[in-house]
Amino acid sequence: MEKEYYKNLAEKYFAGDITEAEISELAGWIRNNVQLSDWWEEEFEKSDADIPLDLRDKMFARIKAEVLNEPVRTPDVKPTERSPRKALVPVWAKWAAMICIPIFIAFFTYNILSISDTGHQSPFIVKADKGDKATVVLPDGTDVILNSTSQLSYLSDFGKNERRVQLNGEGYFKVAHDPRHTFIVQAGELEVKVLGTVFNVCAYQDEQDVTVVLLEGKVGVHTPSSSLVMKPGEKINYNKSTHKITTEKVYPEDYVTWTKGSLYFQNESLDDIMKALSRVYDVTIHIDSPRIAEERFTGTIPGGGIQNALDIIMLTSPFRYEVKDSVIILKEK
């Protein structure tokens, strides 16, 4: 969800593990939400009464300058024999840790989870269970097909300002054209933004990469650190660990054969292939050899059941399988 994404950005901010682009994004989100910005200022003003008033005003001015992008306005201070700058630095560090961090923790755990969801909206959720697929038509006329163990959610104000959905798993989107309202698919920290087009997003939580394949139109793909515009026939891979995007030219129809009952794999490891087969056919598969798990396979597997799929892959891969207590076990030949 969007609120969880910005909560993570806040945590990264205080951990000192945030990029300049992420700081800008976080600050912009706070500035554009009047309720959140006003609440934050009120809470700071109610903070520890032991802090001298002039010091608290300076601290708040500094935070607003950095996070809210507002100019620093501090009262004039007459020079003294001691340097005010030198005296303020250790005090600032001390109170920032004791006051600012707790305030922001409260800010992002309470307000993002309540105020930002105006009216406490409950999302509409569509799920495809293990071994099944699901088809949904969104309020704007967009057609979506969900692959096995996938979930799509959206709020009741979908289409009011933007058309935003959250995806966990794999979905094929045929987006209704609407030049006034951007359609956004959010998959973790990656966003796909379009006005009207056809594309496929694969973003399972247990997989390292998020992939987007574009069939028609044009889409923008955005992450906290980069963005690009895709053209038809392109596939992007976003690595969730390295946060890097790679692009390649593909035949896009191959990557949506799952909507018609077939499966396509392009140089995929058997480990990843077995995860996909497990989802599609609702079976448990165990590989008892690391060497087998790293074997690669390319090809299309037509529908016909798990046994047919394994038999096809075995034609080019050095393994055999057996079934024990309803678990399929892959072994070396």
Image (cartoon, helix red, strand yellow):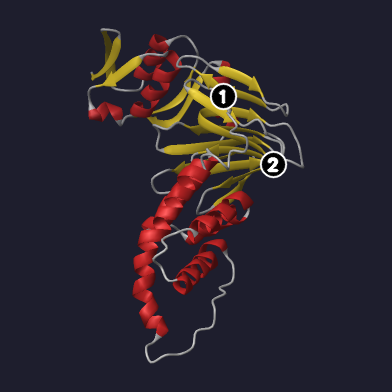
Q: Residue at x 68, y 40 (%)?
A: 162
Outermost residue, front side: 49
Identify the residue position indicated by label 1 in the image: 125
> Can the viewer see residue 244?
no
Within-10-Å neighbours for mark 1: few <14, some 14–19, many 20+: few
Question: Where is residue 214 shown, x and y percent of the image?
Answer: 61, 37
223 to 143, vertically: above or below:
below
3D distance between C-alphas at marks 1 and 2: 20 Å
Q: Nearer the viewer, residue 168 or 226?
A: 168
Looking at the image, residue 105 sits to the left or right of residue 284; the answer is right
Quadrant where the C terminus lies? Answer: top left
Looking at the image, residue 155 sits to the left or right of residue 248; the answer is right
Question: Where is residue 196 shown, x and y percent of the image?
Answer: 71, 36
Q: Quadrant of residue 184?
A: top right
90 to 156, vertically: above or below:
below
Q: Residue at x 40, y 33 (%)?
A: 207
Give the residue type at disc 1: Ile
Looking at the image, residue 169 sits to the left or right of residue 34; the answer is left
Q: Which mark is residue 207?
A: none
Identify the residue position indicated by label 2 in the image: 182
263 to 182, vertically: above or below:
above
Q: Nearer the viewer, mark 1 or mark 2?
A: 1
Q: Residue at x 46, y 14 (%)?
A: 131
Q: Residue at x 58, y 38 (%)?
A: 117
